[in-house]
Image (spheres, helix red, strand yellow):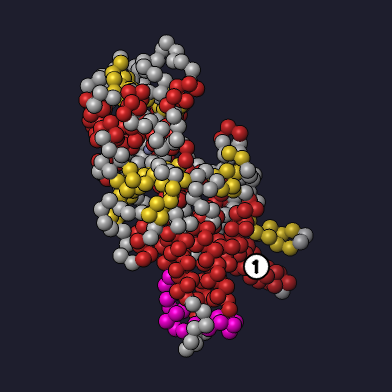
Amino acid sequence: MSEATSSLHIFNSLSGKKELFTPIEEKHVGMYVCGPTVYSNVHLGNCRTFISFDLVYRYLKHLGYSVRYVRNITDAGHLEHDADEGEDRISKKARLERIEPMEVVQRYTVDFHQTLAAFNTLPPNIEPTATGHIVEQIEIVKGILDSGLGYEVNGSVYFDVQKYNESNNYGILSGRKLEDMIHNTRSLSGQSDKRSPQDFALWKKAEPQHIMRWPSPWGDGFPGWHLECTAMSTKYLGEQFDIHGGGMDLKFPHHECEIAQAEALNQKSPVHTWMHANMLTLNGKKMAKSTGNNILPNELFSGSNPVLSKAFSPDVARFFMLQAHYRSILDLSSDALEAAEKGYKRLIQGIELLADLPISNKSSADVNMHINGYYDAMNDDFNSPILIAQLFDTVKLIHRVKQGEDTLTKSDVEKLHKAVHHFVIDVLGLTLASDQNEDTYLDKALSVLIDMREQARANKDFATADRIRDELLAKGIHLKDGKDGTTYGLSS
Ligand SMILES: [Zn+2]
């Protein structure tokens, strides 16, 4: 293995430290990322999480690992309140809209895929669903009951957290202590079947009105939310695998419960490296639909949200997100996006110059130093902001070579060209498409046509002037004559 591939360090949420990454099986990486609950449009904060893990996936592939990337779709079992209470999120949406739960699932799975494709994220290798793995989940519940760490009450099965904690550490990932949790929780109301409020559902009995239900040894019901990830990660990646990722908000209770379930089942810690991506705020505040401080991806792409001054392409939004480290909170604002857009254009323009730089027979700059800088940044816990800063250093070098202030040999230019493209396109996942300039091109083309029409009118050639107007209208572009000249609008 080369030095680049053998010196990747990843911050492990389990140890709280950056650790040298060593896969369980040489050259292979198993990675599981908690996917969306498909009951509403994917929000931008979730997109940031999936873009962060797309960066991880891309860099591992770039290093030559064969990666099996599993990301699930939660299409059942996720209740409104994380503490096993309330209605199933998908059933609720189906009831409100008077459609089938699977219509809800289909609609928002399509939205999720389209949005992530717009952000140029690579699809995972396996995208399993909770409803497709009910049999596996029932088997795990049986296994946990056999281990003595689960108990059945009235057709529901719960995980006995206190008993588990006698020989394990419930709180190992989140750093919480069970005694504190017990101390800080009010006692259960008489209605709960749980022995203790910290216990969580492995299987829930379905009330008669509950639509999404399956037969089980304990009667008709549905799996607890944490169970699906244990079932699907174990099935596709084994009892122990390399990386498990998700949003910071999943660390507790979701991931803590996953660890407990797997330990109860297999008596070993399921995951070597736990990774958590931080959240996205909007204008300094937490995003929430209820307060209106919220923005959807398609509003970002169309500019149709009052917090935005204009539309931003998915490429610019992705670049903006990657300018922050995945473990830092990132604040989105119109100004910050505009700054990112300018930066991104500068990067594209610099890279375009690489194609025809003047060639010398001696290099005055050290190209390897630049390229090693890219690897050093990414090997330091996927530090994309440092990588982008290094790429801007390279852009400065490109301009100096262009202006004759520095020189590069043909092979150095080629080497740099290759490395820059690898890191920008393959690793950062930017398309380098100039589609962020699309509006300007349209502006330019239309100003030519508007000038031609003006000229025709000045020459009293009204037939040509009208033809330009009418043919544009037929294509959905309408011209408006005002006192400051002619402007255009799009009809769609
Ligand atoms: Zn999960």
Q: Residue at x 47, y 37 (%)?
A: 249
Residue sitting at the far right: 483
Locate the N terminus and report the quarter of the image it occupies: bottom left
Q: Residue at x 47, y 46 (%)?
A: 277
The amino acid at mark 1 is: Ser
Image: 153 above or below 417: above
Can residue 369 be seen here? The reply is: yes
Q: Is residue 437 visible?
A: no
Is residue 405 in the magenta section? yes
Name the quarter showing ligand 1.
top left
Please provide the residue range marked out in magenta: 401-419
Q: Nearer the viewer, residue 364 or 302?
A: 364
258 relative to 391 in the view: left or right: left
Q: Is residue 26 left or right of residue 71?
A: left
Residue 489 lies, in percent from the top left, at: 63, 56
Question: Does 73 appear above or below 218?
Answer: below
Q: Residue furthest top?
A: 190
Q: Quadrant of residue 97?
A: top left
Say which residue label 1 marks. Answer: 447
Counting labels gives 1
* Residue 22 falls left or right of residue 377: left
Q: Secondary structure at mark 1?
A: helix
Q: In this rendered view, identify the residue nearer to me: 168 or 105.
A: 168
Q: Is residue 263 above or below residue 16?
A: above
Residue 486: within the magenta? no
| 134 sits to left or right of 469 | left
Q: Which residue is at 58% across, 39% downward? A: 286
Where residue 261 appears, as percent x and y from the top left, is 31, 32
Q: Relative to residue 288, is residue 308 depicted above or below?
A: below
